[in-house]
Image: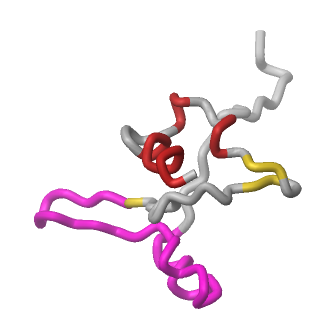
Amino acid sequence: MLKDYQIIDADGHVNEPIDMWEKYLEPAFKSYAPYRYQPSQKDGVVKIDIFSPPTKYMRVEGETIYNKISDAVWAEGIKVAIRNKA
């Protein structure tokens, strides 16, 4: 049935090479870059720490957005921490 169709999954993910961030990201933003964390020889995890420190100043076109972001997207405690600083 799908023989003649070319399908692109809209939920496809791309994993950039982890060293890309170190090589090309402006120095002012490197503290927010994903990084590799390897607690043991067999485990390896890429961590992304974009909400540290939490900020009440997250805006899109000048409008504060932190209070409109779904609870499902936040790590536990982050949204509360931002609200407490507001």
Query: Where 3 sits versus 54, above or below?
Result: above
**Would you identify the image quadrant in which residue 42 lies?**
bottom left
**Would you identify the image quadrant in which residue 80 lies?**
top left
What colour scheme has been applied to the protein in the rendered image? secondary structure
User: What residue appears at the point 15 percent right and 64 percent down from the top-left corner?
Assistant: 39
Residue 16: % across, % down: 56, 64
> How many numbered discs, if any?
0
Query: Where 34 sits versus 8, above or below?
Result: below
**Would you identify the image quadrant in which residue 66 lies?**
top right
**Residue nearest the viewer, comparing 60 with 24:** 60
Residue 62: % across, % down: 85, 57
User: What residue appears at the point 81 percent right and 53 percent down from the top-left corner?
Assistant: 60
Query: Where 54 sits versus 30, above or below?
Result: above
Q: Is residue 25 left or right of residue 74?
A: right
Residue 18: % across, % down: 47, 71
Residue extending furthest top?
A: 1
Residue 82: % across, % down: 51, 50
**Residue nearest the viewer, comparing 84 with 16:** 84
52 magenta-colored = no
Q: Is residue 44 left or right of residue 5?
A: left
Find the magenta span and give its range.
17-46
User: What residue appears at the point 58 percent right and 90 percent down from the top-left corner?
Assistant: 27
40 magenta-colored = yes
Q: Is residue 64 left or right of residue 35?
A: right
Query: Where 65 sits versus 52, above or below?
Result: above
Q: Quadrant of the N terminus?
A: top right
